[in-house]
Image (spheres, rainbow, N blue to C red):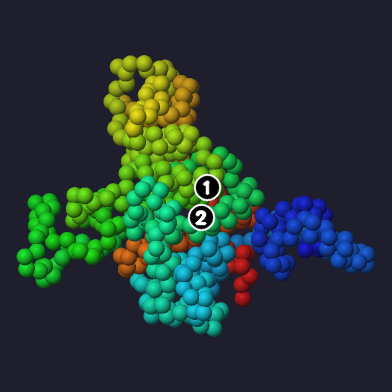
Amino acid sequence: MFLYMKTLDISQPELHRRLKGTAYLWVRFGLDGVPTQQTISYIWRNRLSFTDRHMIRATAQVIREIAADHGILSDDEPRLDPDKIDSTDVTDDQIMNAVEAARDRGFDEFDSGRADNTTFEDMVFFERQGYLNMADRGTTTRSKGSTKRFERISDRRETPHGDTHLRTMKKTAAPPEQTTLTEYEDGQRPTDWERIRDEVLGPFHCGVETVLEELKENGGIREPVIAAIDITPWPVFTSPYKDDGDVTHGEEPIVADGMEIYPREDYPEMIHGLKERHERGYEMATITIIGEDTPIVLGIEPVRRDSDWESEDAQITPQSCLVERLLKQAKQHVDIHKLFCDRGFDTHSVRDAIDRHDTTYLIPKRKYRAEIRDIEELDREAVSDAGVVRDVPREYDGRVHTGSIMYVPSTKEEGAYAAFTTNRDVPLEQVEGFASQYSQRWEIENEYKTIKKHFLPTVGSMDYRIRFLYFVIGVVMYNVWRLTNLLFRSTVGVHLGERPPIPAGEFTEILAFCIVPGD
């Protein structure tokens, strides 16, 4: 470490900054972690003798001269050899290195609640599940092939059987049988799915805090941030209706789409119909940092909707409740300045929820307008043809707040206008620029594509405990990937492009080469 510092003739603060910003350095130096500036200074002054220090300076000078003679001396921070990066050949060992990195940044807070004298500690199961999430091995955790592969690559003498693994995952997501008084905040007993959600999200948020601490130390987050909320489906392919042979005598059907059908009694309540009539699945809502900051998922909320095969009194999650809960989750960690939502959140209740959090919202209206000239109180800009109506009152549940409706020429329909609502008083000259920021919301769509392609396992189980836990683990892996991109942006950005410099498919190789010492 000191040879590096003296060869490059950099200061102790600069050495410390490089060690923190480029994990590759302290790994190659054989250190267990990043020493503090005080530790660096103490070692140099007190642990090394005058002769030691003189030898290091003299050796560093020779190294510097030889490096200069061969044209390999550089004041830049170390960069990866691009030949070491090959996204077409991700090995099991590299996946395990990525899992171990995620383990230290998000898995260690999960607790299955099993007895202390069990054969395997919880971390063994989460290493295995992280491997399954990233490797997409097999259709279930009981897959014989995935079990053998994990046994082969793990450095543990024994690994759990697939059935034991599945039971442990269910235990991890299962809440205690006994409810607590704090769970009755609204005076009602929480549902089973809400208690499962809370059991899983507690450890998740500990991991988010760990990731954000590293991001803030390395300049990856500048508060207040801009965030976005959206919903993504995770399909299932088992029908909610009984086969003819399973219908018992005298059983009453329900009518859906003009047809008599017989719903399964044991069909999971969190599964509902999706966009297409024949599609069914779970849905998860997330809140994510967007804009110029590192995109990190700050909160997750399962979505409960009613379905054709359920009774009329089935519970649903209003959009405003989703937004309220996600904002509360996110504000545990960061200050949010602006929040973007898509047209599906165009309701007074959603706008009221965001406004009560003292956050600026930008939400498009559901329909385009063909003409805006006849709108009363419209302030219109002659050059850009944008317009704004200010001081528009919005009332919900006895509360009133005012906002603006902004109109900008549509990029989709000739002569039409896209309308955006906000609780901010926007000057006319800022309307077009403010509305154009909405394009940043697409980062959350890219987030979903990445999580599903690289960080979710193929799973046949419809159990809500399993599905929600596995989705959360996928988000943990996604957040670690984003953190890795920040740590290595200056290191590999030249070779792999910008934002993000490390594609998700190459994530495991970068981790294997830089974060965790390999074989």
| Rendered residue at 39%/73% (across/down) | 166
Q: Give the labeled residue for mark 2.
A: 205
| Rendered residue at 23%/65% (across/down) | 266
Residue 143 lies in quadrant:
bottom left
Residue 332's disc number: 1
Residue extending farthest left: 250
* Image position, residue 337 (x, y; %): 52, 36
Viewer-side residue, 357 vs 373: 357
- Whether residue 314 sits left or right of residue 508 in the image: it is left
Q: Up-down: is 99 above or below 371?
A: below
SS class, disc 2: helix
Viewer-side residue, 282 vs 420: 282
Q: Which numbered disc, 2 or 1, marks the residue that appears first in the sequence? A: 2
Viewer-side residue, 138 vs 62: 138
Residue type pointed to by label 1: Gln
| Rendered residue at 36%/41% (across/down) | 320
* Image position, residue 281 (x, y; %): 29, 57
Q: Is residue 99 visible?
A: yes
